Image (spheres, rainbow, N blue to C red):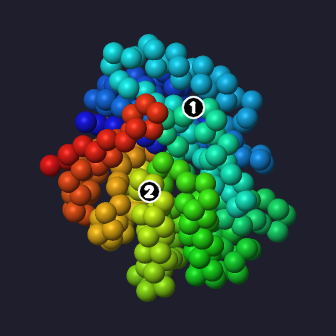
Amino acid sequence: MKACFHTHSNYSDGKVSIDEIVQAAIDHGFERLGMTDHGPVPFPSAWNMPYEKILSYFQDLEKAKEKYSDKILLLRGFEADYLHGLRQISFLRQFDLDVIVGSVHYVGNFPDGTPFNIDKSSDVFIRGLKQIYDNDVRRFAQDYYVLVVEMLTSDTPDIVAHLTLLEKYNKRLGGVIDTQQSWYKELILFTLHAIKLSGAVLEINARSFYRGLSDDFVPDLWTVTQARKLNIDVTIGGDVHSPEDFGKYWDKAIEFAQAAGYNEIVVFGQGGKREKIKIV
């Protein structure tokens, strides 16, 4: 079964409508799809859905769900940004969601108070490291993973998205974060234990791989192998933003999961019901 629970339309930073995204998923053989546009945040953001669009988002989602009910199982969801002290995931659950993808995109604030979006661009990433952390990569990484663990312990999502997002620009920037350092691996292992205790599902995120930003999936093979040793459940997320994205990753992602020792992945159903499916 091909399924994706990390998908964006033009309600956030996706390129096309919900209807067009669903059509593309069907055309590429997907049987389950979670629409998980970026939920609102309490500050200006070009890629998070404004609060006032939530109602129309669900109206369009329900129209597509009914229109394609005989072809695909379409789930109601959000990708929720975890922000320190703000229970955004709990807030979004009031909308009768099937799946919530939890993410940390914002780490600290620039001197002018603007939140540091570590995912926005390599230039913003370098500027944030310099202006907020004085290029102390270790302190930055600690703050990032502390936020992930806070999310897991205080406002647990169904899926933990792109766990090692802070490495996104490593290839482009020549390895600004040395992921082989023992302190860094210890941070990841600590976070994996928090995922295990929370019961959340770890996402194998394909976007950086098929966009050429990384030579590996996110998180990398070492991290997913450690997750397998801890018996953490995984799902495969395309992090789809355009119709063509659906055709770029599935087979390679399955091979990647198998290389890490997995022979099954988790898929979601209505009401957040989880099901494990064999991939071998």
Identify which residue is drawn at 29% across, 49% down. 265
- Looking at the image, residue 92 lies above or below residue 85: above
**Can you give x and y, in whole percent of width and height, for residue 27 in the image?**
32, 25
Instruction: Looking at this view, name the residue that lies furthest to the left.
Output: 280
Instruction: Find out whether the residues at labels 1 and 2 contact each other: C-beta distance under 8 Å.
Output: no
**Residue in front for this viewpoint, 134 or 148:** 148
- The quadrant in which the N terminus is found is top left
Marker count (numbered): 2
Identify which residue is drawn at 45% across, 14% down. 66
**Residue in front for this viewpoint, 197 or 85:** 197
**Residue in front for this viewpoint, 126 or 107:** 107
Q: Earlier in the sequence, mark 1 or mark 2?
A: 1
- The quarter holding residue 149 reads bottom right
- According to the image, label 2 marks what residue? 199
- Looking at the image, residue 150 lies above or below residue 15: below
User: Residue flagged by tag 1: what amino acid is it?
Assistant: Asp
Q: Is residue 38 left or right of residue 65?
A: right
Q: Is residue 168 visible?
A: no
**Can you give x and y, in whole percent of width and height, for residue 30 in the image?**
31, 31
Label of residue 75 in the image: none
For mark 1, give the secondary structure: loop
- According to the image, label 1 marks what residue? 96
**Can you give x and y, in whole percent of width and height, for residue 193 in the image?**
44, 70
Callout 2 environment at 10 Å: few (<14), some (14 to 19), or many (20+)? some
